[in-house]
Image (spheres, rainbow, N blue to C red):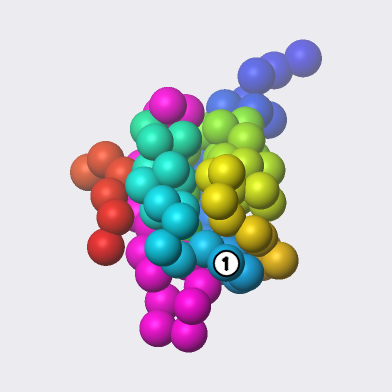
Amino acid sequence: MTEQGSNHQVCFRCLVGGRVQGVFFRASAREQALRLGLTGYARNLPEGRVEVLACGPAEAVGRLREWLRTGPPHAEVTGVACEPLPYQSFPGFHMD
């Protein structure tokens, strides 16, 4: 059995809805992403959602996607929609 299934590099763009702005969602997502060794960004969108783009090993991106479903303590996530994107490399994980 090979490790490629969990170690190949992927990127996912996720839109997180609910009470996710003003509750340290982006900072917490960045902390989680850095802990998992991912690159990308988290940013607030004008309509109140948070966009998270995460790139790295498939297993680590999957863990971040699971975390997005609950977020930090004061968030109230009502939905997460993720789509795969072609892999790209970012210099770290930042907040916009």
**Mark 1 residue type:** Arg
Number of numbered discs overlaid on the protein picture: 1
Residue that sits furthest to the top in the current view: 1
Does residue 41 show up magenta in the picture?
yes
At x 68%, y 51%, the residue is 69
Q: Nearer the viewer, residue 7 or 24?
A: 24
Pinpoint residue 37: horizontal percent, then vertical percent: 41, 29
> In this figure, which residue is indicated by the disc labeled 1?
19
In the figure, 87 relative to 64: above or below?
Answer: below
At x 57%, y 55%, the residue is 75
Residue that sits furthest to the right in the current view: 1
| The residue stretch that appears in magenta | 35-51
Q: Which of 11 and 8 is in front in this view?
A: 11
- The quarter of the image holding the N terminus is top right
Does residue 28 show up magenta in the picture?
no
> SS for tag 1?
strand
